[in-house]
Amino acid sequence: MPVNARIQDMRIASKISFADEDNEFDGKYLSKGQMSALLEYYHACTESRRKEFLEMFFFAFHACGLRVVDVMTLQWGHVNFEKKELRKIMIKTNKRHVIPLTKPALNILHRWQKERAGS
């Protein structure tokens, strides 16, 4: 069995049909306790790629709920550290947004900037 197939078996829940997707979202959000547990998991996690995805989630959370695709397409030119804001045309809506950046979001960006110097 290829490695990719084994990884998918471990990480992705199989679905019987696409109709199941309608029932998956119950309209609820993560509680403060669940967010705290996720943050604790992030700090304990030793898998670098998983930590990277968790950082993207936390950045999106702290940046007014950005979609993951908008985080993934973020460029340094979109970020103004002095004004503590992000200016970006959103992928889904094709509209420009100015997003205020919280201290946790800025901390994540600074960490990414150090790790990806010159990119």
Image: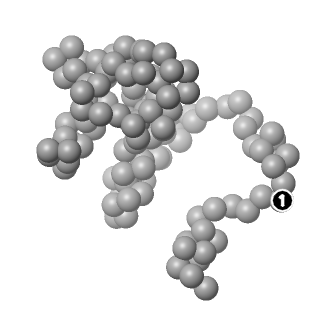
Q: Residue at x 19, y 36 (%)?
A: 110
Up the image or down, 42 lies above or below 61; here it is below
Q: Position of residue 67 (x, y in %)?
A: 50, 32
Q: Position of residue 79 (x, y in %)?
A: 26, 25
Mark 1 residue crowding within 10 angstroms, few (<14) / some (14–19) / many (20+): few
Type of the residue with mark 1: Ile
Q: Image check: 110 left or right of 42?
A: left
Q: Position of residue 76 (x, y in %)?
A: 24, 32
Q: Nearer the viewer, residue 62 or 86?
A: 86
Q: How many marks?
A: 1
**Residue that protrudes farthest toward the bottom in the picture:** 1
Colouring rule applied to residues: one colour
Q: Nearer the viewer, residue 77 or 12?
A: 77
Specify the quadrant that holds the C terminus.
top left
Up the image or down, 12 lies above or below 113; here it is below
Q: Image check: 101 left or right of 11?
A: left
Q: Residue at x 85, y 46 (%)?
A: 19
Q: SS at mark 1?
A: loop
Q: Is residue 5 visible from the viewing direction of this image?
A: yes
Q: Nearer the viewer, residue 47 or 94?
A: 94
Splitting the image into 4 quarters, where does residue 98 fall? top left
**Residue that protrudes farthest toward the front in the picture:** 94
Q: Residue at x 29, y 25 (%)?
A: 78
Q: Nearer the viewer, residue 110 or 104?
A: 110
Residue at mark 1: 16
Q: Position of residue 72 (x, y in %)?
A: 41, 40
Q: Is residue 114 visible from the viewing direction of this image?
A: no
Q: Image check: 22 left or right of 114?
A: right
Specify the quadrant that holds the N terminus.
bottom right
Q: Residue at x 81, y 49 (%)?
A: 18
Up the image or down, 88 lies above or below 57; here it is above
